[in-house]
Image (cartoon, rainbow, N blue to C red):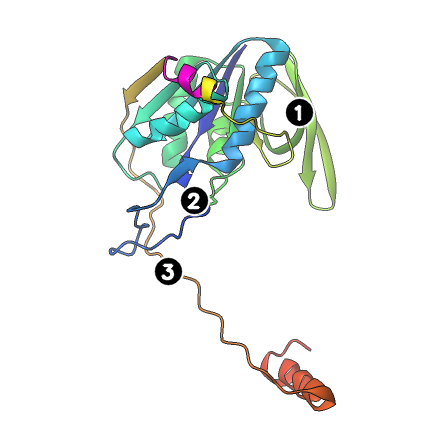
Amino acid sequence: MNILVCVKQVPDTEARVQIAGEGKSIDIQDVNFILNPFDEFAVEEALLTKEKVGGEVTVISLGNESAGSVILTAMAMGADKGLLLKTNSQADDPFQVARVLAAQIAETGFEVVFFGKQAVGNQHGQVGLLVAELLGVPAISEVSELEIDQKSARGKREIEGGNEIFQCSLPAVFTTQKGLNEPRYPSLKGRMAAKKKPLDIRAVELAEARFVIESLSYPPQRPRGRILGDGAQAAAELVRCLREEAKVI
């Protein structure tokens, strides 16, 4: 089975992100980049699928040369090979990204494609579903349970107020979320082996973006708290503030 995983390089979730001077992107100086946390579940599920039904796991990422580091991380976890779609252009438009990925995936051939449900950098959550639409295959988003055999897949996804049980034929695209599995950590042996695994680098051109970021801004600062007093008098003042100032009661 040909199993593909699409991953993204994102700023470390513990990084203190600053807006760049032009006001449309983040300042990447001194920011550490990592494998998107939701993509870790995608990589793990691809590896589990390979262990169950056999096949080969290929990791794909779109970005500049530094994006190769997240492919290496996935190969250290156990993926067989990687494909870096190299571009120096800023790719903020989900459809722009999906078109490039879909073209390469169609050329590579596949039975299953995994994505994380969203990237923590921009939270669009669209690319996986757009790729499936462009490829003309079923797409199941935010999968929480999954079983795959040679011809079909079945599982569960969480929806508001309950769960949805699904079944679909292959090929198909799945987006993964926390709880689907427990991602394995890359071992030292795995990291050394990853350096010897094949990593194909292909230059790609992005189509004109339909979506552009006009500006970024920080969330408004919360007003400082204040002490209203002690005892019953403070309780009455608190009620007044909630009613007249906060207008929540």
Q: Amino acid at mark 1?
A: Leu
> Would you say the residues marked 3 and 2 are in contact, meaning their CB atoms lie under 8 Å apart?
no
Residue of label 1: 146
Q: CA distance from mark 3 to mark 2?
A: 14 Å
Magenta segment: 190-197
Sooner in the amino-acid sequence: mark 3 or mark 1:
1
Residue of label 2: 121
Residue at 47%, 43% (x, y): give it. Answer: 120
Residue of label 3: 217
Sooner in the amino-acid sequence: mark 3 or mark 2:
2
Q: Residues within 10 Å of mark 3 (few under 14, many from 20)?
A: few
Q: Amino acid at mark 3?
A: Ser
The secondary structure that most of the magenta stretch takes on is helix
Secondary-structure class at tag 2? loop
Q: Position of residue 65 (x, y in %)?
A: 28, 29
Q: CA distance from mark 2 to mark 1?
A: 26 Å
93 drawn magenta: no
Q: Nearer the viewer, residue 172 or 90?
A: 90
Vertical relation: 156 (above or below) 121: above
Q: Position of residue 12 (x, y in %)?
A: 42, 43
Q: CA distance from mark 3 to mark 1?
A: 39 Å
